[in-house]
Amino acid sequence: MAAITRLVKRTPSLSSLARGFMSPSSPRDNRNVQWVFLGCPGVGKGTYASRLCNLLGVPHIATGDLVRNELASNGPLSSQLSEIVNQGQLVSDEIIISLLSKRLADREAKGESGFILDGFPRTIKQAEILEGVTDIDLVVNLKLHEQVLIAKCLGRRICNQCGGNFNVANINIRGEDGRPGMTMAPLLPPGHCLSKLITRPDDTEEVVKERLRIYNEMSRPVEEFYRSRGKLLEFDLPGGIPESWPKLLQALNLDDYEEKQSAAA
């Protein structure tokens, strides 16, 4: 458990709160978890949020997906969104909250309970608006050394035929100044995708560093917003998925939940 203490910086009562979210006698009308996942671009929040959603049986809600779905649906906001996206502008908070509110309202019709929001909110204004829309139980802030983040972003590849996401970066950083080293194996594509791999045009070192700078500048107030409410869990990823996943489950007091779910299956 000492290793977990080093990996996770908790707010004082977070451990008991996390246990309460999974308890059958939770005072939240027995609904499922309502969590937010934050983290720098490339940290893997979508991957871990998706895994947790599958484990807990809750929907994975990413605002980027909401925008893409609205664009494809020819819904009431699609023409406005199309113009914004084509001009390279940021989608306004009002539109994002409108799409999110609609998605949350659709849960009852779909028989869903709980959710994990991926990468939202990103500003204080968004956090304040979200607080008026729904309750948030816990905010998980994933962290990774900047050198590793840059290597991961530069190693990202997409198959232009099947749309699969892969990563060719083979990360092996030696520990120094008391900081532990880190290794991450590449996520290589199957043979039939090798000749079809493309790189995102914005995955250059200069662009990635600027994205990280902007994110760090914007995220600090949001982190403090949730820290002051006793809802922030900061988790330093110790490596790739094989190393990080079991430790994240322990940090969320879900380490035996996966075993119980497997046994019940």
Image (tube, grey):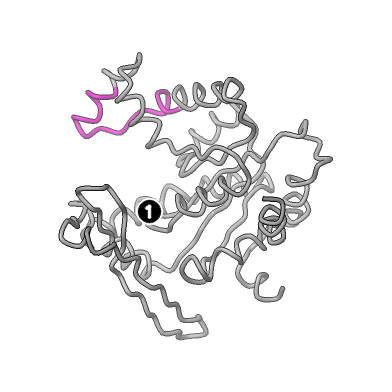
Q: Give the structural element (helix, strand or loop) at label 1.
A: loop
Task: Say which residue appears at 20% left-offset and 62% top-offset.
Answer: 194
Closer to us: 44 or 83: 44
Circle 1 sits on which residue?
41
Residue at 26% x, 48% y: name it. 162
Q: Is residue 265 magenta?
A: no
Which residues are the magenta region? 81-96
Instruction: Mark 1: give few (<14), some (14-19) or many (20+) Cα within 10 Å.
Output: some
Amino acid at dot 1: Pro
Lateral position of residue 15 relative to residue 93, left or right: right
> Relative to residue 97, is residue 255 depicted above or below?
below
* Residue that extends furthest to the left in the rendered view of this protein: 195
Q: Looking at the image, which residue sits at the far front?
A: 265
Taking the spot 68% from the left edge, 38% from the top edge, the residue there is 32
Q: Position of residue 181 (x, y in %)?
A: 46, 81
Main SS category, magenta section:
helix
Q: Quadrant of residue 141?
A: bottom right
Q: Is residue 32 above or below residue 129?
A: below
Q: Residue furthest top?
A: 76
Quadrant in the picture for residue 212: bottom left
In this rendering, would 249 be left or right of 15?
A: left
Does residue 173 appear to the left or right of 252 in the view shown? left
Instruction: Where is residue 247? Give x, y as percent.
Output: 61, 66
In the rendered structure, the answer to whether residue 51 lies left or right of residue 65 reads right
Q: In the picture, which quadrant includes the N terminus?
A: bottom right
Which residue is depicted at the point 22% across and 23% down?
83
